[in-house]
Image (tube, rainbow, N blue to C red):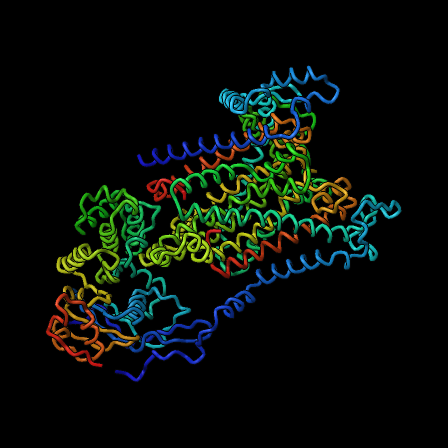
Amino acid sequence: MGEALLSVKNLSVEFSTYGRTTAVLHNVSLDIPAHSHVALVGESGSGKTVTMKAIMGLLRTPPARIPNGEIFFEGRDVLKLPPRMRAGLRGTAMSMVFQDPMSSLNPVFTVQDQMGTILKYADRRLGRDRSKKERLARVAEVLSQVRMREPERVMRSFPVMLSGGMRQRVLIAMALLSEPRLLIADEPGTALDVTTQAQILKLLRDLVEERDLALLMITHNLGVVRETSSYVYVMNKGVIVEERPTAELFASPREDYTKSLIAAVPRLTGGTRYGTREVAS
Amino acid sequence: MSEFDPTVAPDDARRLSNAYQNWYRFSRNPTAVIGAAIIVIVVLAAIFAPWITPYPDHVGAVVDFRARHLPPSFEHWFGTDNVGRDIFTRVIFGFRISLELAVVVLGLAVPFGTVMGLLAGYFGGWTETIIMRVTDIALAIPPLVMALAVSAVLSPSLVHAMLAIAALWWTWHTRLIYSITRQIRSQEFVEAAEMMGASKFHILFREILPNCVSALSVKTSLDAGFVILVGAALSFLGLGVQPPAPDLGTMVATGSQFLPDRWWESVLPGMAILFISLGFNLLGDGLRDLFDVEDV
Amino acid sequence: MEFTLFLVKRVLWSILVLVGLSMVIFLIARVVPGDPARMALGPTATEQQVTDLRHNLGLDQPMVTQYGMFIAGLAQGDLGRSLLTERAVVSDIRSTFSATFELVLSTIIVAFVFGLPLGVAAARFKDKWPDNLVRFVAILSAVTPGFFLALLLQILAGYVLHILPTTGRLPPGMDFTGGVTGLLVVDGLLAGRFDVVGEALRYLLLPSIALAAATMGQIARITRSSMIDVSKQDYIEAARAFGVPERLRVFKYMLRPSFVPPLTILGLEFASLIGNAFVVELVFSWPGMAAYGIRTILQKDLNAVMGVVMVSGVFFVLVNLVIDVLVGLVDPRVRIRGGRQ
C-alpha cells in the first residue's frame, strides 16, 4: 500500500464537562493511503465525528483533551504542530465536506463571495497570489468539476435559491478549491433524498479517481459504504472494532457488532444481501 | 475487543425530577432570583403598607406646613414634599397604585390577547386575517399616545388610562401566542388529538395553551414592568392618577419643580419606579433564560 | 424581481394599516361624551351659535358621511381645523413635526451607533466582564422611566456640570429659519451656517440620549443574543474549518446575519419611542409635535389630537416600511419568502 497519507495512531480523546471526564475515543488507529477511498462507519455517538474533528484540528480543547495518540499527515504529527500551522493545513492540504447543505452555507452571502473568501485565505496560507478575477475563474472551474450546470449563475446565487443537491455540490467544490490531498466527507448526502444522494456519492467516487485525492467517508449507512469505499473501519463506542477491505467485511464479518450493523441494512427481500444470517445475540 | 466499555454511565447521573431541576436552575440564576426578591418585597410592602409606614395618613389631603421640604432624615427616611407629607410613606402606597395598574391592565390584556392568538393561530383563514390585521393597526399606535388621546376624550383618571393601555396591550400577546400556536398546530400530538375527536376547546386549551405557558410568563413579567413605566409616564404628564393620590409618576412631576436643590422629592419616587420595573424585568429575563424561550 | 413584489406587498399592508388607523382614530374622537362644538365655544355661547358651529364642522351628519369627509380631508392633507385656534391642524403640526423628527432620527442613530457595538462586544466576551457590564447597563436603561432619565440628565449636565443646555433647540437669540428640511443640522450644513450646526447638535445631545437609552439597551441585548445564535450555526463552524480568519468570521460572516433582529426590534420599539418622545420633549421643552399634542390634549382640542395620533401612526408605518426594505436587503431569505414574519 505504501506510506499512508494519513495515519492515526492510538488516539484517545476525553471530554470534561461540569467536572466530569468522559472518554470518547480510546486508542483509535487508522490509516488512509494516498488515492484511496476509506470509510469510517458507526452509529451516532460512536465517536466517528470526534475522530474526524480531531484529524481536522477542529476540536476545541477545552473541553476536549487528547491524553495520548498521534496523527501523522504526510509524515508529520499534526498534533505537535503549532496552532497556526495546523490551521494552515485546513482547507488546503486536508479539507472537509460538511454534512448538512442547508445549514453549512451562510445564507446572506452569495456562493462566489463565500468561495472566493475561502480561496483568498487559502492562497495566503500557501503563499500564492491571485487576483480577484483569477479567483472567480478558479471558483467557476471547480464548480464545473463537481458537475454543476451553469456555474456562473450558481456563483451569483444565494444559498436559499439552490436545491439541496446543488448546495451539497457547492460544499464539495469549496473543499476542492485548493486541491487538497485528503478529503473528509461527513455523512455525504444524508440530508438529501436517495436519488440525489446517489448522484453525490457517484460524484465523490469520480473525483477520487480523477485526481490525486484520498477520501475518508464518515457514515452510518453501510449501504453507502459498499458502493463506494475500498476499505472500512467499523467503530463502536469510541473504539475501532473491525477493519477490513470492503468486500471481505461484507462477505465474512468477524465481530458481532459488524454483523448486527450489516443485518440492520434494510433489504426489500428481507435478510441480508449475502443470504439470511443469524444475528448473534 | 478491549476491556474499556464506556457504556455504563457514572453513578451520579441520575434523573432528577423536572420540578426539582427547574427550581435548581432558577435558584442558580441570579437575575431571576433578584427579580423575584424585588417583586416579593414590593408586593409585601404594598399589601402591608398601612402597618409598615410611619405616616399612613399622609396619603390623603394632609398638609403640614412646618414640615415642608425636609431632606431625608431619621424621622422622614425619604424626606418630605412640598406640603409636608412623608415621601417614604407615599412611595410605599404608590407601590399599590403601580401594582394595581399592572394587575388590571394585564389581567385584561393577557387573557383576551391569548385567546385571540389561539384563535388566529389555530383556525387560520378569515379569523386569522382579521385578528392579525387588527393587531397590526393597534401596534401602530404608541400606547402612551393612545392613553393620552383617551384622556383627552374622556377625562384623566387611572381607570381610563388602564383601559386605554389594556385596549392596545393585548395585541402583543396575541402575536406571541399566534406564532407559537402556528408552530405547534402542525405537530403530531395536535393531529392525534384532532383525530381522536377532541373538541376544539380541548385542543386549544388543553393541548396548545400549556405549551405557551413559558413564553407567556416571560412576556407577562416583562410587560408588568413596561406597563408600570407607561403608567408612570402618564401620571407624570398629569393625565393619569390625580393628586392627592400618592402615585409615583405624579410625585416625580410635582417634585421636579424643586430640582436640583430638593432632589429627594423627585429622585426618590423615580428610583422607586425604577425599582419595581427592574424587579419585573429581571424576573422576566431570568424566566426567559430558564425556559430557554427565544422570541419574546 | 422578487424584491419588487416584496416591496409592493409591504406597501399595500402599510396602506391597509393606515386606513384602519384612521377609522380607529375617527371612532375615538366621535364617540365622545359631550359636544365638541359646545366645548369649543364654551358655556357662554348661545344655542344658535353651537348649532351653527356643529353644522359648519359637519357634526350633524351621519357617522359614515363624517368619516367620508374625514378621509377626503386626509387625502388632501387636511386634518381639519383646530377647535381652539381655528388654524389648520396640518400647519400647526407641520411646524412642530420637524423638531420631533430630528429628535427621533438622532435618537435612532445614537441607539444603533452605541447599541450595536455594545451587543457585538457582549457576544464576543460572553460571560466575561464586558458582557455582564453591557447586560447590566442594558437592563438598567430598559427599566429607567424615560422622564426620569431626562430629569436626571438635565440636572447632571445642565445644572451640576453646566456643560450642556437643557431646554430648546437653539440658544436664545440665535435665529435660523427658512431651512429646507426642517432639520436644523441638515439645513445648517446646507446653508453653510456651521455655528447653527454646532449649536443644534449641542442642544440635541441630551434629549437624544434620554430618549435613546431604552432602545439602545434593547438593541444591545438583541444584537448580543443574535450574534450568539449565529456563532453556533454550522456555517460559521464551516468557515472556521476552511481557514477563514477569526476577524473576518466575526465582522463579516457573523455580523451580517445578526443585523436582522435588531432592525426588527427597532420597528416594534418605534411605537414606544414615539410615546417616550412625548415625555422627553416636555422635560427638555423641545418644540416638537409631542408638546403640541399634550397642550391640545389638555385643552381637549379633538381635531388636533386626532391629527397628532394620525401623524404618529403614519410615522410608525413608514418607519416600519423602511425597516422592512432594509431587512430585505440584508437577508435574501426574506426577499424570497416575502416578509419578515
Question: Residue A22: where, in percent of width, then height?
Answer: 39, 75
Residue lying furthest right: B66
> Eyeballing the image, is C323 above or below A169?
above
Q: Which residue lies at the image location 76% right of the left edge and 46% below the top edge?
A: B265
Residue A83 on image: x %, y %: 36, 64
> Quick check: can you spot residue C202?
no
Q: Nearer the viewer, residue B106 or A60?
A: B106
The x, y position of residue B27, in whole percent, is 56, 66
- Tell me what residue is drawn at x 13 percent, y 77 percent: A252
Q: Is residue A127 left or right of residue C296?
A: left
Image quadrant containing the N terminus of chain A: bottom left
If the image is split into quadrants, where does the C terminus of chain A sit? bottom left
Q: Is residue B100 above or below residue A74?
A: above
Mark yes or no: residue A197 visible.
yes
Camera-nearest residue between A27 and C163: A27
- All told, the count of numbered labels is 0
Viewer-proximal residue among B224 and B50: B50
Image location (x, y in percent) of residue B20: 51, 70
